Image: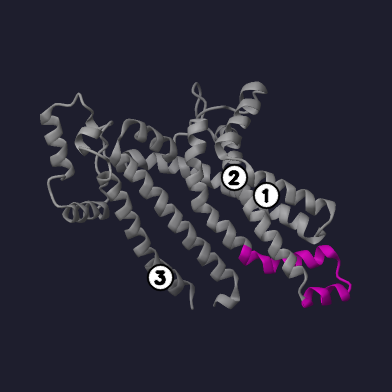
Amino acid sequence: MSIIAFIGTRMLYAVPVLLGVTVIVFLSLQLIPGDIALTLLGRMATQAQLEALRLDLGLDRPLLVQYAGWLLDLFRGDIGNSISQQLPVTQILGPKIVNSLILMAGSLALVLAAGFLLSVASAPRFRTFADRAVVALTLVLASLPVFWLGIVLLYFFGFKWKLFPISGMYNMVNPGGLGQLLHHMVLPAITTAASSIAVVTRVTRSRMIDVLGQPYVLAARARGLSRRQIVLRHAVRNTLPTFANIGGLQIGYLFGSVIFTEIIFNWPGVGLLLFDAIMQRDVPVIQGCVLVVAIVFVLGNMVSDVIVHALDPRKR
């Protein structure tokens, strides 16, 4: 199957998943107990305000008609208006998505680099001290909650030693510059990437150990190839599909993890916007944030499958 045909097939598979997500997101508004309009506006709202909100949300129509209208507006790029900011949700989400993608990209780069290097350092030295140290490190990283690790890094490297900024993407006084952005990104990226580094390292290491035990690798050793040549020519090359697969699957997970990281480090992305929307009971913004996370997760899985399909000739 060609790459184009495979991408088309995966996109078709993604359609029912995304439709299911829209159903869940839409029902999140309906599952609010009590009067939805009263819950959103509060008890200080007048009757006229309540009636206007019910009319704007279409709460007087049947549930299926409401969903059909909401889905049609969604296809047009209209998620609704923010109740707290009185602005279109798409207008609010635009820059926040970019900021979250920047943090996710930095975290993903850290995950791929660290996961690959740790795997190459441990798998060829199976059951040695170096291998056991890498396994122990991944076990620790996988056990660290995101919110706890973020607070610890913030305290030591931000407050106590003052090595990195503690908030935002840029300096408040003189914002701007790639160097400043990378400086602010270090702690949030490490916090977001920690558990994913453990996952990528362990899966890639296991696959590389299997590859190093294959007959053609033993034959290469018998021909006198050094360990470095065997690792680079055979182990790494045949482990790349697995590495790409598990690395691509981290895209959606990392985008979801930045929600907690952005709250801790005050990073102005989708996560911080979602937290503020929950505190303000701004349901349209909450729906928009959840939709963005779901779409990125589905697209990340699709990218992972496409990369594996391109790297592994058996898939073609």
Residue 4 placement (x, y as % from top left): 44, 72
Image marks 1 and 2: residues in contact by CB distance under 8 Å: yes
Please tell me whether the stretch drawn in magenta is mainly helix, strand or loop: helix
Q: Quadrant of residue 124?
A: bottom right
Report the Cα–Cα distance between label 1 and label 2: 10 Å
Report the Cα–Cα distance between label 1 and label 3: 32 Å
Q: Quadrant of residue 228?
A: bottom right
Q: Residues within 10 Å of mark 2 (few under 14, many from 20)?
A: many
Determine whether 316 is above or below 48 in the image.
below
Viewer-proximal residue, 310 or 276? Answer: 276
Q: Residue at x 84, y 64 (%)?
A: 227
Residue 40 placement (x, y as % from top left): 24, 34
Q: Which residue is mark 2?
A: 193
Q: Which residue is mark 3?
A: 8
Q: Is residue 135 left or right of residue 17?
A: right
Q: Is residue 43 left or right of residue 158?
A: left
Three-letter amino acid code of the residue under disc 3: Gly
Nearer to us of marks 2 and 3 is: 2
Residue 250 placement (x, y as % from top left): 54, 53
Q: Residues within 10 Å of mark 3 (few under 14, many from 20)?
A: few
Viewer-proximal residue, 104 or 58? Answer: 58
Magenta stretch holds residue 231: yes
Which residue range is magenta in the image? 215-242
Q: Is residue 149 visible?
A: yes
Viewer-proximal residue, 93 or 242? Answer: 242
Residue 90 placement (x, y as % from top left): 31, 43
Q: Residues within 10 Å of mark 1 (few under 14, many from 20)?
A: some
Q: Is residue 223 visible?
A: no
Three-letter amino acid code of the residue under disc 1: Ala
Image marks 1 and 3: residues in contact by CB distance under 8 Å: no
Q: Residue at x 80, y 67 (%)?
A: 230
